[in-house]
Amino acid sequence: MDELTIQTLIKVKYSGALNEVSMYMNLAMQTGAVLIGGIVLWRMSNMIHKRKQAQRERNDFFNTPYSKGWKR
């Protein structure tokens, strides 16, 4: 039983399949890192935008008695 597993491991190593697995794992890890980094940047950008929007002054140009009536 042990000889069979050792023999299959040797075959896998020299067939090049092991290199492909490590290449795909590296690609998957990079994809995950880019995805997580993108989500973090998106959330930070959203937070900064909300802060800027809260600091802006409201323009009184559109505050008319008519506009107050139709916003209900």
Image: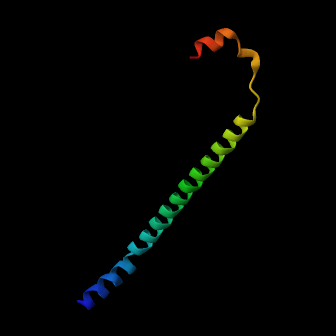
Rendered image quadrant of residue 18 = bottom left
Which quarter of the figure is the C terminus placed in? top right
Is residue 51 shown left or right of residue 7?
A: right
Q: Quadrant of residue 8?
A: bottom left
- Is residue 41 positioned above or below 27 on the image? above
Question: Residue 60 versus residue 33: which sits nearer the camera?
Answer: 60
Figure disc tally: 0
Is 52 above or below relative to 42?
A: above
Q: Nearer the viewer, residue 56 or 31?
A: 56
Q: Position of residue 41 (x, y in %)?
A: 63, 50
Residue plotted at (61% across, 11% down): 69
Which residue is rendered at x = 75% and y = 22% of the image? 59
Q: Position of residue 43 (x, y in %)?
A: 60, 48
- Name the image quarter holding residue 11: bottom left
Work out which quarter of the rendered image holds the N terminus and state it.
bottom left
Q: Is residue 7 above or below residue 35?
A: below
